[in-house]
Image: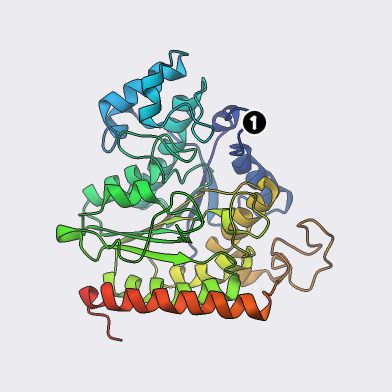
């Protein structure tokens, strides 16, 4: 098989911008991922290179966002904030107003657009933007640390180029802004595996939210119960994502990899290790579709950077050829570090939690088989 061409979309410019110091959202995670890969000799090489992002333009942002909302983002970034701006989701602990909010958001969104363009012009098979994944932003409202929805913008550009898009969101939080953007659009199948809205913001993303009108059946939610570990995630993934991906047969995959699924994340309640994503990525790659991969949540910066670094090695095929990068069998050093590589130590839930989680996942899978699978002619 020909070597996959992988681009890491990043630049020194994007490292200049940060949320307020007391925010749990740390933009530094992307630079930490890059530095870790460089330290291990895994960053650039055959089939992989770095590409600098080009900031999204106002016209590109308006592919989804309203002009009035963009005006509010610009005005508040300049220090002019009024109480009415709260209605646009601004000025809360999760979406604070700060000087660089629009500049950074447009550059991060532009990084996903840069990756999408690389897929369209054939210069890349895989484009990874660790600074992307702002899936909570609506057309006219910020939310959940998200101001500009780069995922929607990239999907729109790909769709408008005539591509069928499979947008798969693996962040711990439901991608509500992305769902809203394509709820009636069959040209973009949006699918989210996330911690259940019964226990986590944004309190939605249930199985019966399946799209509307011509888009009915093209929005899919697979909620995961609190306590989901790697084995339970794999059960959900292989029995929901893979059948739908095969049936839809997209031209391109847009994938959000939020590392807030990892055990120990301070804002979520899942119990996964970074092995979970690394072990299912090959099943996506096996479809041989161009893939835009973004970051997302992840509020333990070091664990997040390690998870994204591991994902990069899998995306680039490095784990297929270099066993030393796998890290299995290494000596556990405490905190999150293995002596021999990027993979976390395997963990296992207690039997009581295992049985509860698996039972809830099977119930959700049964609902998807009833509500969504028949629309795509997927047999039981």
Camera-side residue: 153 or 83?
83
Front residue of 56 and 51: 56
In-front residue for pair 225/211:
225
The image position of residue 303, as x and y in percent, is 68, 53
Relative to 378, say whether 66 is above or below: above
Residue at the disc numbered 1: 22
Residue 85 lies in quadrant? top left
Q: Residue at x 78, y 62 (%)?
A: 338
Looking at the image, can residue 121 be seen? no
x 34%, y 75%: residue: 367
**Circle 1: is it few (<14), some (14-19), or many (20+) Cα within 10 Å?**
few
Q: Is residue 262 above or below residue 73?
A: below
52 and 211: which is toward the camera: 211
Q: In x, y percent, where is residue 92?
A: 49, 30
Numbered marks: total: 1
Q: Is 182 on the left-hand or right-hand side of 117?
A: left
Q: Residue 122 vs residue 311: left or right?
A: left
Residue for point 56% across, 77% down: 356
| Position of residue 137 measured from the top left corner of the image (x, y, whole percent) | 39, 40
């Amino acid at each position: 098989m020909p070597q996959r061409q992988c681009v890491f979309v990043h630049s020194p410019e994007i490292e200049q911008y940060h949320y307020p110091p007391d925010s749990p959202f740390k933009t530094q995670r992307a630079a930490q991922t890059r530095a870790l890969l460089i330290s291990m000799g895994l960053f650039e090489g055959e089939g992989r290179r770095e590409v600098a992002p080009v900031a999204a333009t106002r016209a590109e942002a308006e592919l989804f966002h309203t002009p009035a909302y963009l005006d509010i983002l610009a005005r508040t970034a300049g220090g002019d904030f009024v109480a009415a701006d709260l209605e646009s989701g601004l000025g809360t602990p999760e979406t604070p107003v700060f000087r660089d909010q629009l500049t950074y958001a447009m550059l991060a969104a532009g990084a996903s657009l840069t990756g999408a363009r690389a897929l369209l012009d054939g210069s890349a098979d895989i484009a990874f933007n660790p600074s992307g994944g702002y899936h909570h932003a609506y057309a006219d409202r910020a939310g959940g640390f998200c101001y500009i929805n780069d995922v929607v913008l990239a999907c729109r550009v790909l769709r408008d180029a005539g591509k069928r898009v499979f947008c798969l969101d693996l962040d711990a939080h439901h991608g509500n802004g992305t769902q809203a953007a394509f709820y009636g659009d069959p040209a973009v199948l949006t699918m989210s595996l996330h911690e259940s809205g019964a226990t986590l913001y944004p309190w939605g993303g249930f199985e019966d939210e399946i799209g509307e009108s011509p888009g009915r059946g093209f929005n899919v939610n697979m909620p995961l119960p609190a306590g989901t570990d790697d084995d339970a995630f794999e059960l959900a993934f292989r029995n929901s994502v893979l059948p739908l991906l095969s049936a839809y047969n997209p031209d391109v995959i847009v994938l959000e990899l939020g590392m807030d699924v990892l055990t120990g994340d301070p804002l979520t309640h899942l119990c996964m290790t970074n092995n979970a994503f690394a072990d299912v990525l090959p099943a996506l790659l096996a479809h041989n579709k161009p893939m835009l991969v973004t970051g997302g949540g992840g509020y333990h910066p070091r664990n997040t950077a390690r998870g994204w670094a591991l994902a990069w090695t899998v995306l680039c095929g490095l784990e297929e050829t270099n066993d030393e990068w796998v890290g299995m069998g290494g000596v556990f050093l405490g905190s999150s570090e293995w002596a021999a590589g990027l993979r976390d130590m395997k963990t296992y839930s207690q039997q009581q939690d295992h049985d509860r989680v698996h039972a809830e996942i099977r119930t959700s899978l049964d609902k998807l088989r009833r509500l969504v699978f028949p629309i795509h002619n997927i047999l039981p």
